[in-house]
Amino acid sequence: MYRSPLKLALLLCLLSISACTAAVSYNPSFEGRMMPIPGAQLEGRGVILTTEADDNYVFLGGPTSFTGGGTNISIPLGLITKEIAQHTFERMFDGGVVQTRDINSINNYTVVITPRIRNFSYAYNQLKNAGMLVTPQVDISISVDILDSERNNIRSNTFTSGIKDGDSYLMSGNPAERINRLTHEVITDLLNQAASDVYFLIANQRS
């Protein structure tokens, strides 16, 4: 059946809108508030150990909500997690923290920290506000394994946010960035919990 060029252009336009993907990126200004160190800095330095797959992990998918159901977000969760882990844990050690994919290339470290995203979902909740406003939401889980200087696993924990709300809005030209900001904030909060756990673990061992 013949279709005019105009009709074909309109059809392609509608298809592109319904399959819209918004690509967002790591933004250090989106990071949440870093929790203060519980006590004095720990002696030594830490290592953030990740794999190539960890670093390159990009979530691509749609929301769990009906609102925004025709859209997707591409968000580099691996990079965001690694960078926030760096900023979270480096304050704990007087020697700071280094990042590596090869633990054999690093010497003289106190602990090895391996953060990894285990679950991620997001939503644009319009029902929460009787349809008047949209509330961005994320649900994130991060596992954190801790190895000592002999590479023995001394702690494995999974930190789960549950559904977390961002600031509600009436209209937004870039709703994906609201999810991105909330993602940064929640990952910061989860890694703050992990950092506190690690701090007391090491401090108690040394005492």
Image: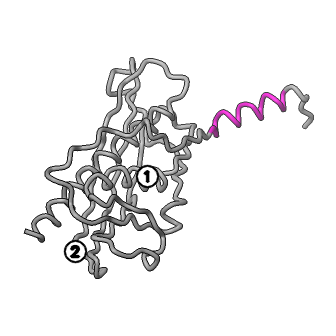
Query: Along the line of sight, which residue is nearer the eye, 145 or 97?
Result: 97
Image spot of residue 198 (x, y percent): 21, 62
Within 10 angstroms of label 2, few (less than 14), some, or many (20 or more) residues?
few
Q: Is residue 194 above or below residue 15?
A: below
Kindly identify the residue that appears in the image at 30 percent across and 42 percent down. 163
Kindly identify the residue that appears in the image at 51 percent across and 52 percent down. 59
Magenta stretch containing residue 14, yes or no? Answer: yes
Kindly identify the residue that appears in the image at 25 percent across and 55 percent down. 92
Magenta stretch containing residue 44, yes or no? Answer: no
Left or right, 189 with respect to 13, comes to: left
Range of magenta residues: 7-20
Query: Along the line of sight, which residue is nearer the eye, 25 or 128?
Result: 25
Image spot of residue 8 (x, y percent): 84, 32
Q: Amino acid at mark 2?
A: Ile
Image spot of residue 42 (x, y percent): 21, 60
Within 10 angstroms of label 1, few (less than 14), some, or many (20 or more) residues?
some
Element under disc 2: strand
Q: Please name the predominant secondary structure of the magenta segment in the image.
A: helix
The residue identified by callout 2 is 154
Left or right, 181 with respect to 156, comes to: right
Element under disc 1: helix
Q: Which mark is residue 83?
A: 1
